[in-house]
């Protein structure tokens, strides 16, 4: 098959009109409002409902809200969450609250930020918060443990306080 | 549930024809009573179970006396209509007119044989179920996130299936005691209880200790052990299985894993010679609990607490996970299967007859015991086993605490009193007549072989699951697989061959004993031996009297009895 080459006009052969056209675009943008950020010195204002790294939260009394029901572990599509339940040992200091995870790990190298863990949590204990940057020297450091997750999550007000509001039994 | 084959075999029981949800079915007029075994009129819930129609229920259990207190199984029914002269009203075609009764009946207790039609999915039945569930949920704490029963819970299932979407209850819930330890093995949560009294009936009727009862009245009703009486018994954990909700939970399993993560494997309890059928609940090479599995020929639906809690050794710290071989300087170093088996085979190939002794554990599977009997025959070896005796009881727990001593007898690896040849073996080792000692799953020093003489052996192999005091003496230490890590069969004290399944692959570098034995046998007999339990078992059936009618497939999940012949029975 023979491709027919179109002959260029004089203006095209000169290149100048095209160069001027190109520069005009650059100059137009030069005087416009800038939309790029000087990251990391400048930080982005995140929209409402942004799904960042999942964190565990405590309530206003400083109690770990997670009860190790393992629903998040079950729902997690990339299997990033691993919850180790507390086992049968008694913890009298926890009072009416019977269960708290012995260990809670999220492998951030697996997490896909889908938010299913937050959605399924029956205790409102896990939230995808505003932290999005995660830089580590090794893959091992990408696994966040319970201590780290609680530290990053901080305190979130709980309006129900389901476990604390348990009264003493009326009968024995 | 009710075994359909058993029903059909009993032909002397007259059948009656009824219709369940418009489907005609004929059911036996009477059924044996759950506890006494006496024939009693078939109840509607039994008829529906035969027809495969599911009726929700809490208090009814096929193995317990009927109590009829939960009202969950309400159904509607119709009987032939009669006129004022008590004559049946007939349709133009001669069939009786069926009229639906104006009130519901509880399916677990209602056994009116005049009933000809049962309706389980009418609008009214749906409303009854919804109303019963609404009442049950009034005081239910809804702490499913921390309840061990979640996932297995009948209340959860029925609310999901038949309940209403939202609660209309606005008052305060009744608060009852939670996490009460009613025995060393069980924790009771009174708030979760639906007061079905299954546990009360179980303790009274099945194990015969009236330890549990109901205290207080009305909304304050609660299950309790009688003050001053403890609930300690070897069968208490069955009450946890019976509990349809999370009121009774096992302390052993408490907060260890949610039930939906556990995979279930049909198996046989290795705790004693009864061979109770069990289900292994495991996840990631870890056993979390054992539960009984129904088999009317062996254990009904029960199992003892000793057997149920006898699984921790599978994941114990002192599990043998690698092959060890003795160095020239006498220390044990990690080795690999190929070179170790080669060295063992090279010694066994050359050894003259009557220079080998084999000590066999009756915890091995039938296939492995059979292969050992073949190995002993080839080497003309001395063999013996050890008996492990315990207390036993009159219900399920056998005196013999090993699962397969029957197979040791069938393949004649020990005398009627296992352990009586040990002294002779020990003496022969001392005199240098026995040059090789192979030990499968036993501790030779503890069994009675003098400890000082083991160094004189040319070959000393221990194949075991756990490290024991004799392990460090062995030239070759082979890691074996536990009952959860291999397939096989056990023969119980009654001579019933039952199959157990593999829940997960062996921990570390461990291998099933049948694999080790078949490899050794293939080399030293110049025959090919199957490397699967199925293949070995089918070889057993071809050559052993009493096993003629069996195949691996025919054993199924409930097993088969050995046909008694002079050779196999005592």
Image: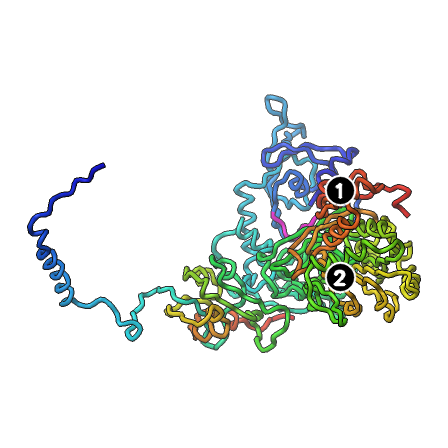
Magenta segment: does it hold B53? Answer: no
Q: CA distance from mark 2 to mark 1?
A: 25 Å
| Of residues A125 and A79, the one drawn nearer to the viewer in this rendering | A79
- Residue A167 lies, with reference to residue B274, above or below; the image says below
The total of numbered circles placed on residues is 2
Residue with the mark numbered 2 = B464
**Image disc number at residue A166:** none
Magenta segment: does it hold B60? Answer: yes
Residue with the mark numbered 1 = B538
| Of residues B521 and B537, the one drawn nearer to the viewer in this rendering | B521
- Quarter of the rendering containing residue B551: top right
- Quarter of the rendering containing residue B466: bottom right
| Of residues B116 and B13, the one drawn nearer to the viewer in this rendering | B13
User: Residue at coordinates 43% horizontally, 74% vertically from top-left?
Assistant: A152
Q: From the viewer's perspective, is B384 left or right of B538?
A: right
* Residue contact between numbered discs 2 and 1, judged by CB atoms under 8 Å: no
Q: Is residue B493 visible?
A: no
User: Residue at coordinates 50% horizontally, 75% vertically from top-left?
Assistant: A147
- Residue A42 lies, with reference to residue B506, above or below; the image says below
- Residue B190 lies, with reference to residue B364, above or below; the image says below
Secondary structure of the residue carrying tag 1 is helix
Q: Quadrant of the N terminus of chain A?
A: top left
Q: Residues within 10 Å of mark 1 (few under 14, many from 20)?
A: some
Chain holding disc 1? B
In the rendered image, residue A140, in percent from the top left (x then y), is placed at 49, 69
Q: Quadrant of the C terminus of chain A?
A: bottom right
In the rendered image, residue B265, in percent from the top left (x then y), is placed at 66, 52
| Of residues B62 and B416, the one drawn nearer to the viewer in this rendering | B416
User: Residue at coordinates 52% horizontally, 66% vertically from top-left?
Assistant: B172
In the rendered image, residue A6, in percent from the top left (x then y), is placed at 13, 43
Range covered by the magenta-colored residues: B56-63
Secondary structure of the residue carrying tag 2 is strand
């Amino acid at each position: 098959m023979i491709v027919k080459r179109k002959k260029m006009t004089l203006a095209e052969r000169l290149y100048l009109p095209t160069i001027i056209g190109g520069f005009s675009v650059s100059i137009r943008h030069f005087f416009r409002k800038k939309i790029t950020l000087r990251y990391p010195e400048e930080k982005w204002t995140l929209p409402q409902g942004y799904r960042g790294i999942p964190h565990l939260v405590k309530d206003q009394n400083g109690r770990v809200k997670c009860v190790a029901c393992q629903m998040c572990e079950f729902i997690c599509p990339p299997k990033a969450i691993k919850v180790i339940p507390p086992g049968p040992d008694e913890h009298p200091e926890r009072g009416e609250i019977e269960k708290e995870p012995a260990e809670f790990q999220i492998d951030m190298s697996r997490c896909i930020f889908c938010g299913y863990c937050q959605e399924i949590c029956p205790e409102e204990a896990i939230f995808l918060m505003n932290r999005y940057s995660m830089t580590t020297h090794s893959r091992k450091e990408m696994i966040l443990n319970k201590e780290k997750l609680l530290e990053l999550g901080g305190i979130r007000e709980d309006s129900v306080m389901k476990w604390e509001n348990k009264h003493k039994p009326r009968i024995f | 549930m009710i075994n359909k084959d058993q029903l059909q075999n009993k032909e002397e029981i007259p059948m009656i024809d009824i219709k369940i949800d418009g489907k005609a079915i004929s059911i036996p007029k009477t059924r044996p009573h759950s506890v006494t075994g006496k024939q009693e009129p078939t109840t509607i819930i039994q008829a529906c179970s035969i027809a495969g129609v599911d009726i929700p229920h809490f208090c009814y259990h096929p193995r317990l006396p009927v109590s009829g207190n939960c009202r969950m199984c309400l159904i509607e029914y119709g009987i032939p209509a009669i006129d004022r002269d008590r004559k049946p009203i007939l349709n133009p075609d001669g069939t009786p007119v069926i009229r639906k009764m104006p009130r519901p009946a509880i399916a677990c207790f209602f056994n009116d044989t005049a009933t000809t039609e049962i309706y389980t999915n009418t609008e009214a039945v749906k409303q009854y179920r919804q109303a019963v569930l609404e009442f049950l949920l009034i005081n239910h704490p809804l702490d499913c996130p921390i309840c061990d029963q979640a996932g297995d819970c009948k209340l959860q299932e029925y609310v999901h299936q038949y309940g209403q979407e939202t609660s209309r209850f606005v008052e305060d819930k009744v608060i009852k005691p939670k996490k009460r330890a009613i025995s060393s093995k069980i924790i009771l949560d009174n708030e979760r209880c639906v007061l079905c009294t299954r546990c009360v009936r179980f303790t009274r009727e099945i194990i015969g200790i009236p330890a549990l009862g109901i205290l207080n009245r009305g909304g304050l009703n609660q299950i309790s052990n009688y003050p001053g009486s403890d609930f300690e018994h070897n069968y208490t954990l069955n009450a946890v299985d019976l509990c349809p909700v999370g009121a009774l939970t096992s302390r052993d399993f408490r907060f260890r894993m949610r039930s939906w993560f556990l995979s279930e494997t049909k198996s046989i309890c290795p705790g004693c010679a009864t061979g109770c059928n069990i289900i292994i609940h495991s996840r990631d090479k870890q056993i979390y609990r054992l539960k009984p599995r129904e088999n009317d020929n062996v254990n009904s639906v029960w199992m003892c607490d000793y057997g149920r809690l006898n699984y921790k050794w599978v994941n114990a710290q002192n599990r043998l996970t690698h092959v060890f071989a003795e160095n020239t300087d006498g220390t044990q170093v990690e080795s690999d299967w190929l070179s170790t088996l080669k060295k063992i085979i090279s010694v066994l190939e050359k050894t003259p007859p009557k220079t080998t002794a084999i000590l066999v554990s009756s915890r091995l599977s039938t296939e492995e015991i059979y292969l050992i009997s073949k190995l002993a025959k080839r080497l003309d070896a001395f063999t013996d086993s050890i008996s492990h005796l315990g207390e036993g009881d009159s219900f399920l727990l056998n005196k013999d605490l090993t699962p397969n001593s029957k197979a040791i007898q069938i393949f004649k690896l020990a005398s009627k009193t296992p352990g009586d040849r040990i002294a002779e073996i020990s003496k022969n080792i001392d005199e240098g007549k026995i040059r090789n000692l192979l030990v499968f799953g036993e501790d030779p020093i503890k069994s009675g072989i003098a400890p000082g003489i083991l160094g004189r052996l040319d070959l000393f192999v221990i194949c075991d699951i756990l490290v024991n005091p004799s392990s460090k003496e062995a030239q070759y230490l082979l890691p074996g697989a536990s009952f959860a890590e291999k397939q096989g069969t056990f023969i119980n004290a009654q001579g019933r061959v039952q199959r157990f399944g593999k829940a997960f692959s062996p921990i570390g570098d461990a291998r099933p004993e049948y694999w080790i034995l078949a490899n050794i046998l293939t080399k030293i007999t110049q025959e090919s031996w199957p490397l699967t339990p199925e293949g070995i078992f089918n070889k057993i059936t071809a050559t052993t009297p009493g096993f003629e009618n069996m195949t691996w497939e025919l054993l199924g999940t409930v097993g088969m009895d050995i046909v008694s012949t002079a050779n196999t029975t005592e």
